[in-house]
Image (cartoon, helix red, strand yellow):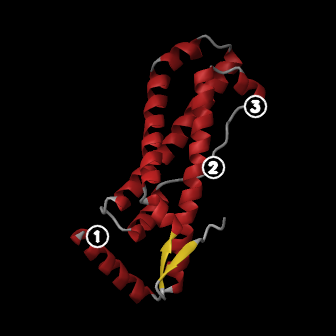
Amino acid sequence: MSSNVTCIQGKSDTVSFGLKLASSDSFKSLFKEGMGLVEEAASYLDGDGRVESRLLQRADALAYASESMRLTTRLMQLASWLLLQRAVNEGEMSQTQAAAEKHKVKLVRQERSSAPEAFERLPERLQSLVQRSLRMQDRIIHLDTLLYSQSKEAMAERPPAISQQLLLIEQAFSRAG
């Protein structure tokens, strides 16, 4: 599926598939899952994870520390993106404002930091959290591409004055609704 999928409504209006998806029940489910993963990881790393990490050999403890730091960073990026998109969905900001704010969210693909054999020796719960966060990361990066690549292309095609007027109209309607 192309990342620029749109469906035509009327003659000149287009509705972005990504925008529709981001404001759907699917997004609400993704938001809940993502924030739940953040809470679960924080609870594990502050509790059982600390105990389990102390039982590891030195090299594996280093892999644990590296994976847990990367996991935390990845989840904070994902949570920031989810919160930003939720603000758009709830009318607290426009998609254009979110695109402008998005530079603060460093949404980049982060793989595991340790070699596969070292990763296999880590506690199962940490392995599970890392794998689930990687799948969540892929889903969010895909959705981000759908949302913001179209947004950039659309803004580049419009003269700046028109873009500003459309932004003002969009803000007025979002406050009224």
Query: Which numbered disc flags the more N-terminal residue, 3 or 1?
Result: 3
Q: Amino acid at mark 3?
A: Ala
Q: Report whether 69 appears left or right of 43.
A: right
Which residue, given by chain and number where applicable, does mark 3 sit on?
115
Estimate how packed mark 2 is, as few (under 14), some (14 to 19) or many (20 or more) residues with alpha carbons within 10 Å.
few
- Please, what secondary structure does the residue beneath circle 2 have? loop
- Please, what secondary structure does the residue beneath circle 1 have? helix
Numbered badge on residue 154: none
Where residue 88 sits in the image (x, y, percent)?
37, 61
- Please, what secondary structure does the residue beneath circle 3 have? loop
Q: Amino acid at mark 1?
A: Ser
Contact between labelled residues 2 and 1, with CB atoms less than 8 Å apart: no
Query: Which numbered disc flags the more N-terminal residue, 3 or 2?
Result: 2
Residue 164, compared with residue 145, is above or below; it is below
| Disc 1 from disc 2: Cα separation | 32 Å
Residue 77, compared with residue 114, is above or below; it is below
Residue 97, compared with residue 69, is above or below; it is below
- Quadrant of the frame with the C terminus: bottom left
In the image shown, does 99 or 145 lie closer to the viewer? 145
Where residue 24 sits in the image (x, y, percent)?
43, 57
Which residue, given by chain and number where applicable, does mark 1 sit on?
174
* Residue at the (65%, 68%) spot, across then down: 2
Q: Report whether 1 appears left or right of 69.
A: right
Query: Which numbered disc flags the more N-terminal residue, 1 or 2?
Result: 2
| Disc 3 from disc 2: Cα separation | 17 Å
Q: Quarter of the image holding residue 141?
A: bottom right
Which residue, given by chain and number where applicable, does mark 2 sit on?
109
Residue 174, compared with residue 69, is above or below; it is below
In the image shown, does 70 or 22 lie closer to the viewer? 22
